[in-house]
Image: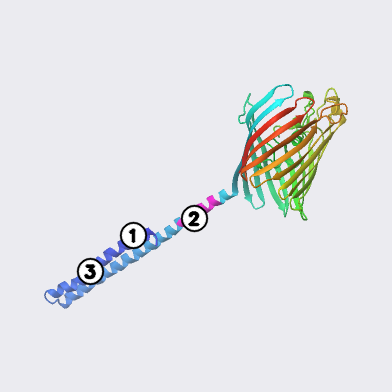
Amino acid sequence: MPRTTRAVLANTRRPLAIALTTLLAAPLASAAGSTPTLEEMWQLIQTQNREIAELRSELASSRSQIQETAVQAEVAVSAIESLQSVATSSANKTHIGGYGELHYNQLSKADGGRKDQIDFHRFVLYANHQFSDSLRLVSELELEHSIAGDGQPGEIELEQAYIEWDYAPRQQAKLGLFLIPVGMTNETHEPETFYGVERNNVEKNIIPTTWWEGGAMLSGRWGEGFSYDAGVHSGLFLDPAADTYKVRSGRQKVGEANATDFAYTGRLRYTGVPGLSLSVSAQYQTDLFQGELHADSGAADISATLIEGNFSWQRGDFGLRGLYAQWDIDSAINQIKAGADQQSGYFIEPSYQLNDKLGLFARYSAWDNLAGSSASDSETTQWDIGLNYYLHPRVVIKADYQNQDAASGAQDGLNVGVGYSF
């Protein structure tokens, strides 16, 4: 019984007890003196009847107050429980996450210079919200190189912000700004998910990771382990006035992006065998110049096609990953830079997990942004060997040594880092 109800009952019982005591005492007092007459007895009975009626009225009123108090208490408890339910429901539908990584590079350059640098390379926050069982928001906000602004080394970037709709069983649609489904690292790049302090150079210079666009994407699964992605979205833009030719320099990051010509991406993936993942993707860029004319080449449009394939195989403690990617670009781009019509790269990476804390890896990679010219010695190759030490499944310390071979700009040395995700 609520505390308020108990108080009302206590207050009601006291006057009732006093009244009953008075009524019982009255005849006894009379008996102690002379015997009352019939008229006096009649008056006494009438008085007692009135007092009993008044007591009954007060008791009925008290009972009504008790019932009203109990109802108010139940309403208050119900309101509190409702508020708690709403707060819990809202909290369960919105999720915060993120990741970050600190890098230290100590590298010797081919020209005799050095790179001794420590950099909080990325600080990322996720904010996702579940509107319903079939509709959700996915977003990712990133600060690169610790500080952003005029004259500062970093920038703030919105890498994901899309609505995902489960429009049918095992089928989804994405609308907004999303990561392009190409390669191994572009969509999944939390520090504990890959070996090496820095992301591999093939997916940096050829894919180019991290790469996001704005548009629409359909994804789905069928059969045992098969999945697909197919989308139309904004494209790359190689500014004709800047004479750029490397694919990475064409990322617009969906910031007032030139969308004269769109791009199209498709991917097929197979994960039906435990420990094995196979994937192939293709992208067609309608025009890397986005309709603008290049003065020297005279070209109004430069189409481009990317073909990429990768695999990942984990058998017990042993792992093996590999990737190949190649761009075929309209030959008019050779007017800007000879050999730029083909840009390609690959890597192979074996690894071994010594225990649940320590893993070792080695990686050989090669990439070339001027692969279309046989006369150009433009290919860069690199060996990386190192380890990942896991303080927690989502907290990792990394170290590796890189040995690079390039016609110019080679860098050899040590990389150390720490990363986390939550």
Residue range of the region highlighted in magenta in the rendering: 77-88
* Distance (Cα) linking label 2 and label 1: 24 Å
Q: Residues within 10 Å of mark 2 (few under 14, many from 20)?
A: few
Relative horizontal placement of residue 80, taking residue 370 as reference (left or right): left
Relative horizontal placement of residue 300, taking residue 28 as reference (left or right): right
Residue corresponding to mark 2: 81
Residue 7: assigned label: 1
* Distance (Cα) linking label 3 and label 1: 22 Å
Report which quarter residue 322 is drawn in: top right
Residue corresponding to mark 3: 21
Residue found at x 75% / y 52%:
221
Report which quarter residue 331 is drawn in: top right
Secondary structure at badge 1 equals: helix
Three-letter code for the amino acid on which mark 3 is drawn? Thr
Q: Residues within 10 Å of mark 3 (few under 14, many from 20)?
A: few
Q: Earlier in the sequence, mark 3 or mark 1?
A: 1
Q: Nearer the viewer, residue 236 or 32?
A: 236
Residue 343 lies within the magenta run: no
Three-letter code for the amino acid on which mark 1 is drawn? Ala
Q: Earlier in the sequence, mark 2 or mark 3?
A: 3
Depth check, mark 2 against mark 3: the one in front is 2
